[in-house]
């Protein structure tokens, strides 16, 4: 199959994983696409001088703008989309911050919302004159269109089986994201790139930045997964989300146990024992409002297939 690359700019933005939005690009399985993305505020904070503090405005009703959708020829519900992240080229500067109206601290502990414009250079982010942070580029929002029960899921804070605002730091260069196809042509959306983010994204803000990403998109017919998975390095992880930690945890453990049962013929108890020995549960974002995102990582044993 021919390998081609399509370019999609960030001049038209979306704010929902909407199946009714006409595709802005169309590719075939095996093709590459290069996509430009905006930061979480669509460039509205770019006029701040790097290195300076400023009062961080509250997030707008529409946040985390997406570029897309991208239609994948032949994708049908019940298939699996494989999105491999090959390149993330970051803009020259981004911003970070801490909200006062929502955060994990005691009420009133943050007396005013603070933002900081952060320049990149020499392979690091210059948070301040004294502090630099290693760059760890990642995609915060990646997902496919889904048939809504009411309205299409919005981009700010929504995540689920379709993907969405997962904010998982391992979704970076070299990773392959497995997504279920839920509508014809899949309709892939990408946005909310971070130059760096810790597990938990505890302020609700990472190093938000515009970027240009190159992805390779492949298709596995009839192999849909229940939740998004990500393969990175020698690890494989399922990514779940819920307002209740116990529900998100249950869904993650169930997904991995089911994968072990199907891949290796294990009983549930044996699979659970293996997960307890070798699995690591991590946080994506847990800022204190809305669904939290979890991932359960296990070694990518040969023959282990996401379920």
Image (tube, grey):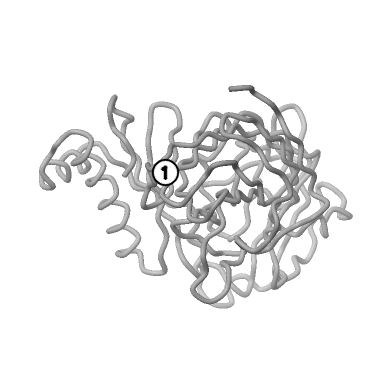
Q: Quadrant of the N terminus?
A: top right
**26 to 147, vertically: above or below:** above
Q: Position of residue 112 (x, y in %)?
A: 70, 71
The answer to whether residue 122 shows anywhere in this view is yes
Residue indicated by mark 1: 229
Q: Position of residue 95 (x, y in %)?
A: 74, 51
- Locate residue 29 relative to residue 244 in the image: left or right: right
Q: Position of residue 269 (x, y in %)?
A: 10, 47
The answer to whether residue 282 shows anywhere in this view is no
Q: Picture quarter containing residue 211?
A: top right
**20 to 69, vertically: above or below:** below
Q: Could you tell me which secondary element the residue under label 1 belongs to?
A: strand
Q: Residue at x 67, y 59 (%)?
A: 64
Q: Residue at x 30, y 64 (%)?
A: 246
Q: Position of residue 135 (x, y in %)?
A: 64, 35
Q: Residue at x 71, y 38 (%)?
A: 125
Q: Nearer the viewer, residue 237 or 185?
A: 185
User: Around disc 1, counting alpha carbons within 10 Å, would you say few (fewer than 14), some (14 to 19), or many (20 or more)?
Assistant: many
């Amino acid at each position: 199959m021919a390998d081609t690359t399509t370019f999609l700019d960030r001049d038209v933005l979306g704010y929902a994983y909407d199946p009714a939005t006409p595709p802005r690009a169309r590719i075939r399985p095996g093709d590459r696409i290069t996509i430009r993305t905006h930061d979480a505020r669509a460039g509205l904070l770019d006029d701040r001088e790097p290195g300076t503090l400023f009062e961080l405005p509250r997030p707008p009703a529409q946040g985390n703008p997406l570029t897309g959708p991208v239609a994948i020829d032949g994708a049908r519900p019940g298939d699996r989309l494989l999105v491999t992240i090959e390149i993330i080229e970051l803009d020259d500067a981004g911003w970070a911050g801490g909200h006062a109206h929502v955060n994990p601290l005691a009420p009133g502990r943050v007396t005013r919302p603070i933002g900081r414009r952060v320049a990149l250079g020499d392979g690091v982010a210059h948070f301040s004159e004294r502090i630099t942070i290693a760059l760890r580029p990642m995609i915060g929002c990646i997902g496919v269109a889904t048939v809504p029960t009411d309205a299409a899921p919005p981009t700010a804070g929504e995540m689920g089986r379709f993907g969405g605002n997962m904010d998982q730091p391992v979704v970076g260069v070299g990773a392959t994201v497995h997504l279920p196809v839920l509508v014809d042509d899949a309709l892939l959306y990408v946005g909310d790139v971070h130059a760096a983010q810790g597990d938990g994204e505890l302020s609700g803000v990472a190093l938000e930045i515009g970027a240009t990403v190159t992805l390779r998109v492949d298709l596995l017919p009839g192999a849909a997964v229940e939740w998004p998975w990500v393969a990175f390095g020698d690890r494989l992880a399922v990514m779940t989300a819920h307002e209740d930690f116990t529900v998100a945890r249950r869904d993650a453990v169930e997904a991995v146990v089911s994968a072990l049962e199907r891949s290796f013929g294990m009983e549930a108890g044996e699979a659970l024992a293996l997960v307890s020995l070798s699995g690591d549960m991590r946080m994506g974002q847990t800022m204190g409002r809305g669904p939290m995102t979890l991932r359960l990582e296990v070694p990518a044993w040969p023959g282990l297939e996401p379920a």
